[in-house]
Amino acid sequence: MRKFNFCAGPAALPEPVLRQAQEELLDWQGLGCSVMEVSHRSPEFTQVAETAEQDLRDLLAIPDNYKVLFLQGGATGQFSAIPWNLFGGASKTADYIHTGQWAAKAIKEARRYGNVNIVASSEDQNFSYAPAADSWQESADAAYFHYTPNETIGGVEFPYVPEVKSPLVADMSSTILSQSIPVDKFGFIYAGAQKNIGPSGIAVGIVRDDLLDRALPDIPRSLNWKIAADGGSMDNTPPTFAWYLSGLVFKWLKAQGGVPAMAELSEKKSALLYEFLDRSEFFSSPVAKESRSRMNVPFVLADEKLDKQFLSESEAAGLLNLKGHRSVGGMRASLYNAVPLEAVEALVAFMADFEQRHG
Ligand SMILES: *Cc1c(COP(=O)(O)O)cnc(C)c1O
């Protein structure tokens, strides 16, 4: 039996997608073998790749002057690749907003290759909010401006898109496809697939094509966006199964009503949980109200001695993976696109009952 899965990543996938993959696993498209066992250059797989790209373009309304890349190495591979791809132009300085653990890792990578200007940080309040735009000082000549629209671990989401002078770069790993975004405001968008797209092993990159000419001369081939773009993301063998499955998720998203439907659903799901947390005298959210994530909802119990019991009882009730990140403790419910409203209803009912018994 499938249970409700609140894992932060790799996360829940839509059940109809898994069923389709299961159905066609042994004999895909009448070829007598699985999708994993054909050449990535075969006409059948080329079709998978092209359809996945077009569906993603449709879902996010990606303009024609952007390339869509399917990459390896996860989001980590991409925040490592960003300085390599963008510091070879006129500037080796980049602006970064520091909002928590993922921003910190991205900053650390960029510092290896250039100067990092921290334009704003929420460290003063334990990374529990998204800094307001009026406080920061942009560099005069930044190669790019990087931020993390949704900090998956802290559960902090920017309620706005920064307006900046240099190309805006965003790690959308845990928020992509959950609301409409003005793609034309960004220079580069990237996301590891395993939160809101598909299985781990593939990452999506969306790059404005005028940014493909400023790589550092020594850039490793496998990190080079231009090579990826020119080769249809097939300079080397891509993760074909993850690509195929991501394509099925895009089709599923379209059938659900696309990104607007997901935005509405994510509002509903997260509001249900936050309203409960705010009413409760036993559970609470550590995140500032205006910066609360729709995708990752951390929460704490009034008595942390009950954490273990909460986790074992919730698991027994069919609510999986509610343990908070090992670095912050407490609980976290991730409410990505594939998590249905019923899952959140079941979670809130369980929490109300737990509070009644232990509060
Ligand atoms: C999960 C996550 C990452 C790391 O992704 P990998 O694919 O494991 O490298 C980076 N940034 C954010 C915001 C994430 O949620």
Image (spheres, rainbow, N blue to C red):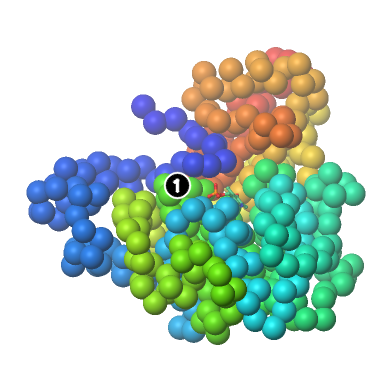
Ligand 1 within 8 Å, label 1 CB: yes
Q: Tell me if 63 is positioned left or right of 14 in this view.
A: right
- Which one is in front, 339 or 40? 40
Q: Position of residue 164 (x, y in %)?
A: 75, 77
Give the answer, above or below, for where 228 lies relative to 104: below
Give the answer, above or below, for where 215 lies relative to 155: below
Quarter of the picture holding the N terminus: top left
At horizontal 90% and vertical 49% (from top left) the residue drawn is 124
- Which one is in front, 280 or 327? 327
Q: Position of residue 194 (x, y in %)?
A: 48, 48
Give the answer, above or below, for where 336 lies relative to 348: below
At horizontal 49% and vertical 41% (from top left) the residue drawn is 10
Determine if residue 73 is in view.
yes
> Which quadrant of the figure has residue 345?
top right
- Which one is in front, 129 or 47? 47
At label 1, counting other C-alpha atoms closer than 10 Å, the crowd grade (few under 14, some 14-19, many 20 or more) is many
Read off the residue under disc 1: 200
